[in-house]
Amino acid sequence: KAGVTQTPRYLIKTRGQQVTLSCSPISGHRSVSWYQQTPGQGLQFLFEYFSETQRNKGNFPGRFSGRQFSNSRSEMNVSTLELGDSALYLCASSAGQNQPQHFGDGTRLSIL
Amino acid sequence: AQSVSQHNHHVILSEAASLELGCNYSYGGTVNLFWYVQYPGQHLQLLLKYFSGDPLVKGIKGFEAEFIKSKFSFNLRKPSVQWSDTAEYFCAVIPTGAGSYQLTFGKGTKLSVIP
């Protein structure tokens, strides 16, 4: 079974731009979560989607948004990029609430 | 909201030494508990999980963890570490109640094993 796939692996953007990251979950997984990983703050929850609905949102500004498609694939968008948005963005999929989350390799976003 | 505390930021051990990494969580209800590992340059992988039942759970690569409900702890152990265990280890919790889908991580513990 293929794992969680995130594209692209690396991105370089400048302040003020916007970016879209993509995540394809494990086949059959309908829950997709996004996390931001930085050396200072560690792993922080962004949001979770299930059946195209956002069920949970972390404590991030409105510049961070996401969506999920009918095939469970998910995208995350960050608008008006700031230097502090430089991080590894991780996507995880799960078969259900009481099932473990499986992570992708992440997208490393660097803001210049 | 739940929170997770990992006591050690960086642990350095020699091969064959025993390992115990501390994890405490704060939450008023029942939780599912996880340990994840991130090897250098690789993605987060699930080491082991606790949902219910026997509080001593065994995971991959010889790791085990014990859930002590009264102490809100879920410490990770391995009797004899190897150089290949060098990685960062994350403890995580998620409430079991309906409407809770947020996995909360500790800050992580870096383990360096010296050959």
Image: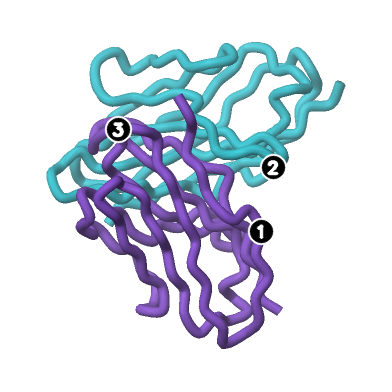
Give me the chain that's cyan: B
Q: Is residue B26 visible?
A: yes
x and y, in percent, of residue B5 in the image = 46, 47
In front of the other: B25 or A52: A52
Q: Nearer the viewer, residue A31 or B67?
A: A31
Judge from the rendering whether residue A24 lies leftward or rightward of residue B19; answer left or right.
Answer: left
Q: Which residue is mark 3?
A: A28
Q: Position of residue B76 (x, y in %)?
A: 51, 26
Kindly report which numbered mark, 1 or 2, lies closer to the viewer in this rendering: 1
The amino acid type, in three-letter code, at marker 1 is Tyr
Give the residue number, with chain letter if any, for mark 1: A10
Asked if marks 1 and 2 fall on the same chain, the answer is no
| Residue B70 visible in the snapshot | no
In the picture, residue A77 is in which quadrant?
A: bottom left
Helix or strand or loop: what does disc 3 sit on? loop
Residue sitting nearer the eye, A103 or B81:
A103
Q: Quadrant of residue A58?
A: bottom left
The residue sitting at the left extreme is: B98
Quadrant (top left, top right, bottom left, bottom right) of the C terminus of chain B: top right
Residue at image position (41%, 72%) is A64
